Every structure is written in C-alpha cells, then in structure tokens.
Amino acid sequence: MLHTSKKLIVVVPMQGTLLLDIAGPCDVFTIANKVLGSDPSLHAGGYEILLAAPDATKKVITQSSVELLCPLRVTEIDRPIDTLLIAGLGTEFLNNTHQGFYKWLREMYPRMHRVGSVCIGAYALARAGILDGKRATTHWEFSQDFQDTHPQVKVDTNPFFIRDGNVYTSGGVSSGIDLALALVEEDYGREVAVKVARKLVFYLKRPGYQSQFGVLLDEHSLTNTVAGKLRPWMTAHLDQDLSVEQLAIHMNMSPRNFARVFLKESGLTPAKFVEKLRVEIARKYLEETDLSMEQIAEKCGLGGTVSMRRVFLRHLMISPSDYRRTFRTSLAAVPVI
C-alpha cells in the first residue's frame, strides 16, 4: 500500500553504542527516500528521520568517540511516531540505567505503528515490558545473558531479525541494516527495497543465520574444568576415538564419574562437547586453509563430507562450502593446529 505522507522514524541512540547501530538503519531510510523520490509514479512520501535522546543528555557519545547531538529528547516529540528504533546500548546497560526512558517507552508503545531494536537495544524493549511473551533476538554474544535476565522473552539468536506482531528485534550491529531493509520492503514493496539494497551493496535478505558468526564453545567459561583441561589434547586428536571411555582414561577417572563431572561443569555431555569442538576446528580450516572438504572432515573426525555437512547445518545452519565462501580469509594454506 502506498502512502503520500512521510513516515516519522525515530531513532534513539543510546550512550556508548556502536556508530553502525545508528548509522546503518538511518542510511537505509535515507537511500529509500532517494529511490522513492526518483520515481514519481510511486506517489510515496518516504521517511522523516529523527534522532531523539533517551534522557536529558542530548549529546550521545558512541564507542568510536563520535559525538552525536540529538535535536530533542523523546519526551519532547509531540506528533505520531510511525516507527521507533532503539539503536543498541552501551556497556552501562548492565547497570539498568534510563529508567525514565523505559517508563516513557512502555506508555507510548501502544500509540506507535511499530517499535524495534538494533543489537542489544533489545534489553531496553524487554525492560519496558514490550517483549514479554514475544519472540526476540539480539547479538549472539549476549544470548544467554539476555535469556537469563529476561526469562519471559522467547529468545532466538539465530535469525538476523525477528518480527512478532508490531515489535521488531535485530541481531548484532549490521543486522540493523537487515531490519531496516525489511521495514522498507514492508512499507513500499520488494522492488524499492531491492534498489536500496543494491545502492548500499548489501543483501536484501542475507543468507545464513547469526549463529554462523558466533562461537560454539566459550573458552573462558571452561577454565579449570575437566573440559578445559582436556580441550588442548582433544584438539590435537580429533581424528581419533574420543569416546567417554577414552577421555576418562586420559583423565584417570572412571567413565561414569567422568561423564557426571563433565556435564556438571560444562553443561554439555562429552559427546556434544566433542562434536562442537570438531565443528569449531573445522571452521578454522575452512577459513584459513585450502584443504579439501574431504581432508577437513577426516582431520576433524567428522567422518565424510556428507556427515560434516549435516553437523554444520545442525550447529551453524550453513553448509561447509557456503561457510568457506563467506568467511575464507586467504587462499594460502595456513597451519591451524
């Protein structure tokens, strides 16, 4: 459906956020205006973009030290808001600051056409109670903390963005661009969104999932655990039998006690841990070497290429070949282990 009046897009930049959380969506809507303006037959009003501060401090300092001066505070907006996007949060979000803003957001949300967040801006939506009972995503690195902090939210950090009703959440940093393009497509159709994506040299719908950018095993959390102590040895012997019995022998423990302690400390069974470790090392080979798929599958103990593909799809939702095309860093073979 086409509209002739401009849609007010309010972007709320939070202190200490990344500049791309703010600039990415803003640039998408700006390019959309140019695309719409170049085709009079569309009769579309496009967007008005407004930066609004969440509190009394109108100056927002990003992580890159770039300072932004918002023309007004959110509480000073006196006209209908079509879309409000919370552009990330700085590291101070752990202190649960901006209580006044969360209260305003909770009260104003019913009057908005839609509301959304970029990256860990999802915390603000959750604190305002807007995500209660809804599906949402955020930066993959904060997945567990977000779920622990807001158990009432159905967290899924695989998609680049999620829509649940009129609430939109996006994943890490650049996912704000994915979300903004989806909003343009929703407003003015696929053809306009495609033109915007082409001008930005960006996918309209990026292949894969957020999980392909994350890590399967958190090395720091495994320090001083059985899994952490075994990891270097397992990494060097991935092509061998890494059954519970063999791992227990290496740790001078009974298989039953080993499995119990391993699960308690790491939250994973030994078999699941070994599979994740094999995928992690296979990722490094795909990124940094020119070894064939067959060689990588063999070196990592993943059986053959069919088995490796199945495991990659289960953990990363992307095939090994697609992963290599996306993340390969060099054509030269580089030793990984």
Image (cartoon, rainbow, N blue to C red):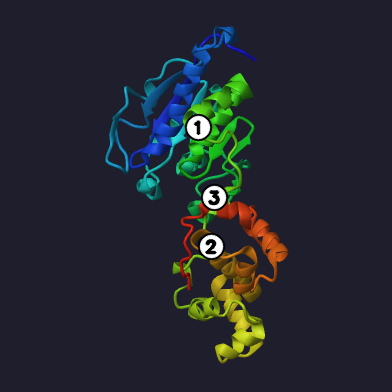
Extreme residue in the right direction: 306
- Quick check: marks 1 and 3 in contact, CB under 8 Å? no
Of the residues tagged 2 and 1, which is closer to the observer? 2
Lower position in the chain sequence, tag 1 or tag 3: 1
Q: Which residue is mark 3?
A: 326
Q: Is residue 15 above or below residue 76?
A: below
How far separated are the C-alphas under marks 2 and 3? Answer: 14 Å
Using the image as rendered, state which of residue 238 and residue 115 is in the foreground: 238
Q: Is residue 292 above or below residue 10?
A: below
**Can the viewer see residue 20 in this picture?**
yes
How far separated are the C-alphas under marks 2 and 1? Answer: 52 Å
Lower position in the chain sequence, tag 2 or tag 1: 1
The residue under label 2 is which amino acid type?
Asp
The residue under label 1 is which amino acid type?
Arg
Q: Which residue is mark 1?
A: 106
Rate crowding at label 3 as few (under 14), some (14 to 19) or many (20 or more) other CA atoms within 10 Å: some
Residue drawn at x 47%, y 55% as measured from the top left: 329
The residue under label 3 is which amino acid type?
Thr
Q: Which residue is mark 2?
A: 290
Element carrying mark 3: helix
Element carrying mark 1: helix
Residue drawn at x 62%, y 76% as measured from the top left: 270
